[in-house]
Image: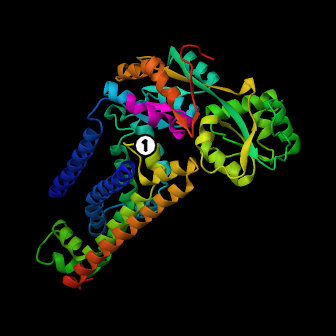
Amino acid sequence: MHDFLGIVGLSIGVSLAATAAAAAVSLPVGTALAIFPFAGRRWAVILINAFFGLPPVVVGLVLYLALSRSGPFGFLELLFTPAAMVIAQTILAIPIITALVHRASERAWARYGDELTTDGATRLQALPQILMIIRADLVTAVLAGFGRTVSEVGAVILVGGNIRGLTRTMTTAIALQTSQGDLSLALALGAVLVGISISVSATVFALAGRARTAGSDEV
Amino acid sequence: MIAFRYALFRYVLALAVALAAINASAGAEKSIVLASTTSVEASGLLANILPQFTAKTGITVNVVAQGTGKALDTARRGDADIVLVHDPEAEREFIDEGYSSTVRQIAWNDFIIVGPSSDPAHILGGKDSVAALKAIASAQAAFVSRGDRSGTNAAELRLWRTAGRTSEALSPEKWYHDIGGGMGQALNAASAMNAYTLTDRATWLSFNNKGSLVIVVEGDARLINRYDVIELNPGKHGVARLDAAKAFAEWLVSPEGQQAIGAYRVNGQRLFNPSADSPK
């Protein structure tokens, strides 16, 4: 039972940290992609949308080699730690959140861009305002990122190592239980994972619904 | 743009601090990474004996269970501080490459061939593992191979070679299923396909999805399965935690560690026979 709570806690903690880190990068970048014109912007957008489907196991492998003691970042001693899992999941969540934020920002910018920059305001000053306008979409974007991270197994098992009490998450525990033939226990863990995903979405959607009715009929 | 850069810098800084905090909380105590074969983890042995070692020394042992081939590779890259595996040939290669000069046997048990109780190859109750494999091949009965360079996989391929079949000759056979997975996955697959497979006895005894699988061949001298703890040579990657790793290896072969290994039982059955004093 102690193990179980630890596993659930680690899963949620790692996924939340990764989602927060990814959101910190993706929100400004996604909006910036919509409002700052620059050469190669089209390609940047195509690339980010392509990385939507980045295979976790490939991210895991590349990160494994990078964080290995014989790799370029080995001196950080991060392999087989929760921090390595956070990095892996952050990399997986960034394209998803960025792409979704970019799409919403593009719509908002087309509609309010001129208005926001008429009285001499720069595009940079318009960026936080665009984020404010699309805040309901941000919720969906961040939630999609969380869904990706909490359900993922391929990358975390490689860079985390599925170490009992240190890097064993719900998904890697399910993989392990299955391999020990404890199918009913694996299924029970799976049910908890699905339950957590559903409650997180429900909570966030409830909050988002309130935000929408409270403020914004802008978009 | 400058303000944006500052904001970006702040974000990156916050991320770095968060990572450092998570890492510090994880690595507060002294810890080592043990790259091990899956059987010592999946059978519950390590979960049972490691707390005793940690209580005595304060050293946490983080187990990455990967199978022998991968565990040795992890050590080659410098990502493990100590190794616990069971494939004499792969271990010899590892030593010859200069990664280690201290290998000690800590325990043994045996491999067994398990298969469906319907026994299509008619080998139930036999003792000769090589004859059994020949019978499986001539009956073209389904056989599941780990196919993952694990110690069990290596032992299986050695037996097939003795039976006159190389892995190259086996892989095109329709009845030979190379699943590329751990022991548990292989047992799950064998159970689902009514196939034969070679397994270590410890994983078998603690495995909970046997279905119609039963032990068909056991007791062959060729089926002995030896577990070795391998200390790593310093210098290869400038590994810092070798002292703690050495303390762990010494504990495993000490009377106390040996007693702990021998005392571990599942359903009243001993899974690993301590053998540091008289290696098999």
Classed neighbour count for the residue bearing mark 1: other residues with Cα under 10 Å, few (<14), some (14–19), many (≥20): many
Does residue A25 appear left or right of residue B97 in this picture?
left
Name the magenta segment's main secondary structure. Answer: helix
A138 versus B33 height, above or below: below
Quarter of the image for residue B91 reads top right
Residue shown at 57% from the left, 48% from the top: A179
Task: Based on the picture, tell me whether residue B50 belongs to the magenta stretch.
Answer: yes
Instruction: Depth check: give the residue in front, B173 or B1.
Output: B173
Q: Name the residue under label 1.
A: A159
Residue shown at 70% from the left, 48% from the top: B190
Where is residue B247 drawn, in percent x and y? Answer: 38, 19
Q: Is residue B10 visible in the rendered structure shown here?
A: yes
Quarter of the image for residue A121 reads bottom left
Query: In the rendered structure, which segment of residues is drawn in magenta?
Result: B34-52
Please give the chain letter of the residue carrying mark 1. Answer: A
Task: Based on the picture, tell me whether residue B113 belongs to the magenta stretch.
Answer: no
The quarter of the image holding the C terminus of chain B is top right
The quarter of the image holding the N terminus of chain B is bottom left
